[in-house]
Amino acid sequence: MDRRLYDQLSAPTTPRFDVAISHLTNAANHSKLSLGSAAILGALGGRRGRQTAVVGIVAVGATSLIANLVVKPLAHRARPNRADDHRDTSPLTPHHVPMPSSDSFPSGHTAAAFAFATAVASVWPAASVAPFVLAGAVGYSRVHTGVHYPSDVVLGAALGGSVGAAIGRIHAVRSPRGDRS
């Protein structure tokens, strides 16, 4: 079932959409989207925004360590066998998404994006809508560009959400009562 869903979700659609999804997935490399979101929260959200940004970035870091140094080596799942002409065009084009060399399970991009969104929700729920939408889009982009199976993304989201929630709870316990406004 995972493979059939992968085949459906990774099928090319329109050139404009495929290029946009490729740009999105490449922008998520190294958690750049979460870091950018944190910068916006920190710059525009006052003290609460800065706290939210810090908690979100801590969640991204913890999730990345767990996903890449613990879970991926233990699971050791191969990446999808993407067709040569399937979103693997020349690096000189904007539609290039290289196949990562790391293991496929879980999706680290998705895990980090959901960790950030969940941590943001724990500190400032009203500010979490955009990060959750972005996290969902990042997860979809990883399957659509052919670099992950859907189960890699779903379980990556669960891992990131769990770590983000744990970091949020730690922040709530450690913060003075007045700082959680």
Image (tube, rainbow, N blue to C red):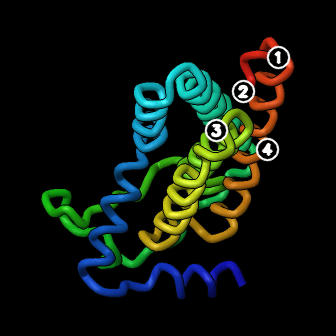
The kind of secondary structure element at disc 1 is helix
Give, as a three-letter code, the residue at label 1.
Answer: Arg
Which residue does the numbered mark 1 point to in the structure image?
Answer: 177
- What's the residue type where badge 4 is placed? Ser
CB within 8 Å, label 3 to label 2 = no
* Residue linked to disc 3: 120
Secondary structure of the residue carrying tag 3 is: helix
**Residue 24 vertical placement versus 74 (above, below):** below
* Residue 153 found in image quarter: bottom right
Q: Residue at x 37, y 67 (%)?
A: 21
The CA distance from mark 4 to mark 1 is 23 Å
- Residue 51 position, x and y percent, is 61, 22
Does the image show residue 73?
A: no
Verify CB contact (< 8 Å) between mark 1 and mark 2.
no
The local crowd at label 1, few if under 14, some if 14 to 19, many if 20 or more residues have their Cα within 10 Å, is few
Residue at mark 2 = 181
Disc 4, SS: helix
Packing grade of label 2 (10 A; few <14, some 14-19, many >=20) is few
Mark number, residue 28: none
Q: Residue at x 35, y 49 (%)?
A: 27
Q: Nearer the viewer, mark 4 or mark 1?
A: 1
Where does the image place residue 46, in percent across and percent down from the top left?
A: 50, 23
Residue at 63% x, 87% y is 4
Q: Are marks 2 and 4 in contact (CB under 8 Å)?
A: no
- Give the mark nearer the N terminus: 2 vs 4: 4
Instruction: Quote the CA–CA distance across marks 1 and 2.
Output: 8 Å
Q: Nearer the viewer, residue 166 or 101?
A: 166
Q: Quadrant of residue 82?
A: bottom left
Q: Which of disc 3 and disc 4 is earlier in sequence?
A: 3
